Image: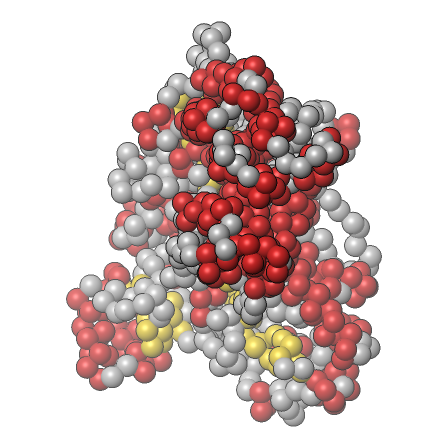
């Protein structure tokens, strides 16, 4: 029933006596002398593998300082690009742990692996077709019904449902390792929603840049054709020529959200969450700022049971109510088909060799490690007879029923009473357990503390279904254990990742995802914008503008401390200092208002982690919002936001440091604004980002004017206002006199030629709203535009002399109402989320 893999290729002490140690020590020089030779370096015959020899020859030619410089470059790219992940149970992202050395596989070795993966993928596709179709395999006794029905991933609701597009598996992955004879062995199958392809792509981008010349000289096979085949395969599964493809993600709290954003951006898919989607008729639609737009294909990264709360897990907030019914009617193609995760159950592993002979008429090319499913008496008895020699795992999941954690249980390492409890549990309900042979993983070279060291690894290989068969990614996702004696590899257990280079003896043709010019329909817009993305862009603009206003207050307050003349006047009762402090307290940036504590107030408003209105909290809010927009932000924009967050978290020793940091962050905010202004296409996304900035700036500018241009305002108040709205130079170039109330009110509130004025912001908002599509077809002006026109009319007809504090307060309230109206209209939540957004024209 089970295929077996023996132990690995010997211990590191045995490796010392193997051929090639002297040469590898020479290649890596004295600074990289190793205690043992990694298994991957040596072939089954004990001779060095030619691909590794080529790599180490070139690597050894680099000086130690050059090696460290290139490694530092790779690490810097990971930080700047924000490549992150979350281990199970984490509440914060971790920096991606990329190994600085690739895993290298030669062409001949790869051909063996590719053939086995393609065969296995085809076999599993045929098994799924039977499991959810005719059910002959169970009826004829080829597979016990319990081995399938015992899995929570077996969905009776999908029985008899033919997958739109014709395939249950669009993408398949297998975790593999080496056997003692140099062959690859399957450790587990990934048929649910295989992760890692996006990280494999990012690994390649980082390492190919760090070692560009070495990468080219090694003739590394490109991965772009694989992703092109994947994209074309999903397109072909739709029922129209220009389909809209969405990548369904659980959201930015997912462990692999960065990968979802990377794939969506690279493949040109729309990144969507369950709340973005709605059922209309027999189709799935995405809520956009232009109404409902049809989704033809969903590449899901949400588990099957969470896809539809109406028919599956009713507690799920990740799916789309009614999705399964649309799937039945052929209204959307889902990759992979819901329920495909049933084949990940280890209970099925032992039956695959016989199924290959039955369905394919051939033997499995790639065996898997010995597995005993305890649901059968003979296998259970055999496994119990050698209980101390195997790892016990759940038959349908990672965890072992009745034992804590998600890791396998090694019976030989359990206390006597726990071992007896495990034995009894297997006897009582064997269908929940499998036993697997303990196998030592093959090792690959890693760079550790200035030298090469061997570490065990697992390779995840990806295959996609195409019209010409299965296409296998030339490379994959490699996970490397931190401990040399590891028997299992998990990212959550402190492992690192590595790029995988499949190398050729011949030059490799460069490839790209860019199609030929004559095959593309020319267009000038980026596509539809989901309402959730528009909401995040709008609030990203508001958070950044709110942070800028807070920083300008901090700088003004800090300057009164740093300037001796202003400091003396502040101590004696400068009204503007009190007003700045009150504003910071009102904005929940600070808690203190003492004139003698201005420096402390400024420091708290800059860096407090407890105050939600502090500059640090606002920038972190912007960063969290930007995290949900990873597929839409350029690397430069992302880097600016992350650097601001890091800089604000630095320890500041003195009062000058507070002001200097505020000024640095203000320059960073100006950089981001410049990137948005000069680099973003003038599509809906840019408009919502700019609308967020404009409406927040209008509110803050009016609030500043109300505080510092009141009826009894003196020179200090008016001068402070000009500083806060950055209009000192403009005012002095127009008026050769000191600060006067009416001219300043006009400049700050009513002047449409001043890009910092409230009137300028409202005018820009009107232009944006007018350019956005109407969501109703009744021909009437919609509420956001009605409010924006009303505020603009008021500012256009107002006179500076009539704008007293009461009028400015009313104006501020109207600006706040406009901001709320934009949110309610374009970003519906709650009951409004299911509204009919357009009467006709659903695309």
Which quadrant of the rendered structure holds the N terminus? bottom left
Q: Nearer the viewer, residue 796 or 598?
A: 598
Q: Position of residue 721 (x, y in %)?
A: 58, 40
Residue lying at the far front in this picture: please name it: 572
Dividing the picture into quadrants, the one containing residue 437 is bottom left
Q: Is residue 110 above or below residue 771?
A: below
Q: Is residue 142 left or right of residue 39?
A: left
Whether residue 742 is situated above or below residue 627 in the rendered picture: above
Image point 42% across, 76% down: which residue? 438
Residue 82 point in image, percent of width and height: 58, 56
Identify the residue at image location x=32%, y=61%. 395
Query: Can residue 471 be seen at all in this image of the molecule?
Result: no
Find residue 209 and report its image quarter.
Answer: bottom right
| Residue 184 or residue 453, whichever sits in front | 453
Residue 366, horizontal then vertical, whole percent: 53, 62
- Classify 838 as above or below 382: above
Looking at the image, which residue is at 46% across and 60% down? 596
For the image, the number of numbered tags is 0
Q: Residue at x 55, y 18 (%)?
A: 798
Scheme by which the image is coloured: secondary structure
Does the image show residue 54?
yes
- Left or right, 613 with reference to 630: left
Image position of 486 with respect to 751: above or below: below
* Rendering coords of residue 295 (x, y %): 49, 28
Instruction: Judge from the rendering whether residue 591 lies leftward or rightward of residue 112; answer left or right.
Output: left
């Amino acid at each position: 029933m089970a295929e077996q893999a023996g132990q690995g290729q010997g211990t590191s002490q045995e490796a010392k006596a193997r051929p090639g140690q002297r040469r590898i020590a020479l290649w890596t020089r004295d600074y990289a002398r190793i205690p043992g030779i990694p298994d991957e370096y040596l072939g089954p015959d004990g001779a060095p593998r030619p691909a590794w020899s080529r790599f180490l020859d070139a690597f050894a030619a680099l000086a130690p300082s050059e090696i460290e410089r290139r490694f530092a470059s790779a690490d810097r790219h990971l930080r700047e690009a924000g490549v992150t992940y979350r281990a199970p149970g984490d509440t914060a992202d971790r920096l991606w742990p990329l190994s600085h050395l690739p895993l290298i596989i030669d062409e001949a070795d790869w051909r063996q692996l590719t053939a086995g993966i393609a065969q296995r993928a085809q076999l599993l596709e045929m098994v799924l077709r039977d499991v959810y179709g005719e059910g002959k395999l169970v009826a004829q006794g080829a597979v016990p019904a319990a081995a399938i029905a015992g899995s929570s991933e077996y969905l009776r609701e999908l029985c008899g449902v033919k997958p739109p597009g014709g395939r249950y598996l669009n993408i398949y992955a297998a975790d593999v390792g080496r056997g003692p004879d140099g062959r690859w062995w399957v450790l587990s199958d990934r048929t649910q929603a295989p992760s890692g392809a996006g990280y494999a792509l990012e690994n390649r981008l980082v390492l190919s840049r760090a070692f560009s010349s070495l990468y080219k000289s090694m003739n590394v096979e490109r991965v772009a054709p694989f992703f092109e085949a994947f994209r074309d395969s999903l397109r072909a599964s739709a029922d129209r020529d220009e389909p809209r493809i969405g990548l369904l993600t659980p959201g930015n709290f997912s462990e692999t959200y960065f990968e979802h954003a990377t794939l969506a951006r690279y493949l040109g898919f729309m990144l969507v969450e369950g709340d973005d989607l709605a059922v209309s008729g027999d189709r799935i639609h995405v809520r956009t700022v232009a109404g409902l737009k049809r989704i033809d294909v969903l590449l899901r990264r949400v588990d099957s049971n969470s896809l539809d709360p109406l028919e599956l897990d009713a507690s799920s907030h990740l799916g789309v109510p009614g999705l399964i019914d649309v799937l039945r009617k052929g209204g959307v193609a889902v990759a992979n088909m819901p329920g495909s995760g049933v084949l990940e159950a280890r209970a099925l592993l032992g039956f695959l060799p016989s199924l290959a002979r039955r369905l394919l008429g051939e033997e499995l090319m790639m065996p898997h490690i010995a597995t005993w499913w305890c649901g059968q008496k003979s296998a259970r008895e055999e496994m119990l007879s050698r209980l101390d020699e195997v790892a016990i795992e759940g038959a349908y999941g990672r965890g072992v029923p009745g034992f804590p954690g998600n890791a396998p249980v090694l019976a030989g390492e359990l206390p006597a009473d726990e071992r007896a409890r495990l034995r009894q549990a297997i006897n009582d309900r064997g269908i929940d357990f499998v036993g697997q042979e303990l196998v030592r993983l093959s090792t690959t070279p890693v760079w550790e503390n200035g030298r090469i060291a061997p570490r065990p690894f697992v390779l995840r290989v990806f295959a996609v279904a195409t019209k010409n068969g299965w296409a296998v990614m030339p490379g994959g996702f490699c996970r490397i254990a931190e401990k040399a004696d590891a028997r299992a590899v998990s990212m959550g257990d402190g492992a690192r990742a590595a790029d995988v280079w499949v190398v050729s003896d011949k030059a490799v043709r460069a490839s790209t995802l860019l199609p030929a010019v004559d095959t593309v329909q020319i267009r000038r817009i980026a596509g539809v914008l989901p309402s959730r993305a528009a909401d995040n862009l709008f609030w990203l603009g508001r958070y950044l503008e709110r942070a800028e206003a807070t920083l300008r207050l901090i700088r003004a307050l800090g300057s009164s401390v740093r300037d001796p003349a202003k400091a003396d006047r502040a101590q004696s009762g400068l009204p503007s200092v009190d007003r700045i402090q009150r504003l910071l307290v009102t904005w929940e940036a600070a808690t203190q208002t003492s004139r003698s504590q201005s420096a402390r107030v400024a420091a708290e408003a800059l860096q407090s982690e407890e105050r939600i209105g502090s500059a640090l909290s606002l920038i972190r809010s912007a960063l969290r919002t930007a995290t949900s927009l990873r597929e839409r932000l350029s690397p430069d924009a992302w880097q600016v936001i992350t650097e601001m967050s890091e800089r604000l978290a630095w320890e500041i020793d003195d009062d000058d440091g507070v002001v200097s940091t505020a000024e640095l962050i203000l320059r960073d905010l100006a950089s981001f604004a410049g990137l948005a202004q000069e680099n973003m296409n003038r599509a809906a996304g840019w408009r919502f980002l700019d609308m967020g900035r404009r409406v927040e700036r209008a509110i803050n500018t009016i609030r500043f004017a109300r505080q510092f241009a009141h009826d009894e305002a003196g020179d200090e108040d008016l001068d402070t206002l000009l500083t806060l709205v950055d209009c000192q130079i403009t005012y002095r170039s127009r008026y050769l006199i000191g600060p006067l109330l009416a001219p300043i009110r006009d400049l700050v509130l009513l002047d449409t030629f001043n890009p910092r004025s409230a009137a300028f912001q409202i005018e820009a908002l009107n232009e944006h709203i007018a350019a956005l599509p109407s969501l109703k077809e009744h021909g009437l002006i919609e509420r956001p535009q009605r409010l924006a026109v009303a505020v603009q009319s008021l500012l256009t007809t107002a006179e500076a002399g009539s704008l007293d504090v009461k009028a400015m307060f009313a104006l501020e309230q109207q600006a706040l109402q406009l901001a709320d109206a934009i949110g309610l209209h374009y970003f519906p939540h709650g009951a409004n989320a299911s509204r009919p957004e357009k009467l006709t024209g659903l695309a």
